[in-house]
Image (cartoon, rainbow, N blue to C red):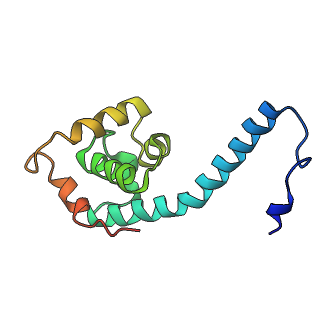
Amino acid sequence: MGFERITRGWAKGSKDFKDENLRKVVESDASEMREPRWERGVDEALRLMDKNESDLEVGPKAALWKVAIARFLREHYLTPYQWIADRLKMGRVSSLSSVVSRSRGLSRKEFPQWDRLRNHENLD
């Protein structure tokens, strides 16, 4: 693509300005490339949980099936908590992070929803 020829002069401004703006562009592009994978993960997880899009709207923010999907997305796709909170309608990021963290301490009996996803680690 010719990037190896771009060494200097391609952006105007101070080094700090260029570094900050380049980082934002790279992060934005990377996120856009990963979002379809995250969406496929949500779609497949909903199917495995016998849920659908409308369940995301009406289900409680901390429903265990939502927590299982959130944990799966976070652990297997490194999906940002903000994206998960918005997509799964789970409220604040800090609350989501807390419930996902607490779910790791639950037994299989207390959290069978997790087994439904964990056993399908080949979701992509």
Residue at 29% across / 65% down in the picture?
Answer: 121
Report whether residue 92 is seen.
no
| Left or right: 111 as drawn, with respect to 23 | left
* Residue 1 % position (x, y): 80, 69
16 relative to 112, above or below:
above
In the image, residue 81 above or below residue 49: above
Viewer-side residue, 89 vs 121: 121
- Residue 10 image point, x, y percent: 89, 49
Kindly indicate the quadrant of the structure image that contains residue 122: bottom left
- Please give the name of the residue rendered at 85% of the width and 52% of the height, measured from the top-left corner: 7
* Left or right: where 38 falls relative to 5: left
Q: Is residue 79 positioned above or below 81 on the image?
A: below
Residue 21: image x %, image y %?
Answer: 76, 39
For residue 21, side relative to residue 80 (left or right): right
Residue 50 visible in the picture: yes
Front-lying residue, 104 or 8: 8
In front: 37, or 19?
19
Q: Position of residue 92 (x, y in %)?
A: 43, 32
Q: Please, which residue is most extreme toward the left here?
A: 109
Number of marks? 0
Is 95 placed above or below 33 here?
Answer: above
- Residue ID at (24%, 60%): 118
Which quarter of the rendered picture does the C terminus lie within?
bottom left
Residue drawn at x 40%, y 59% as measured from the top left: 42
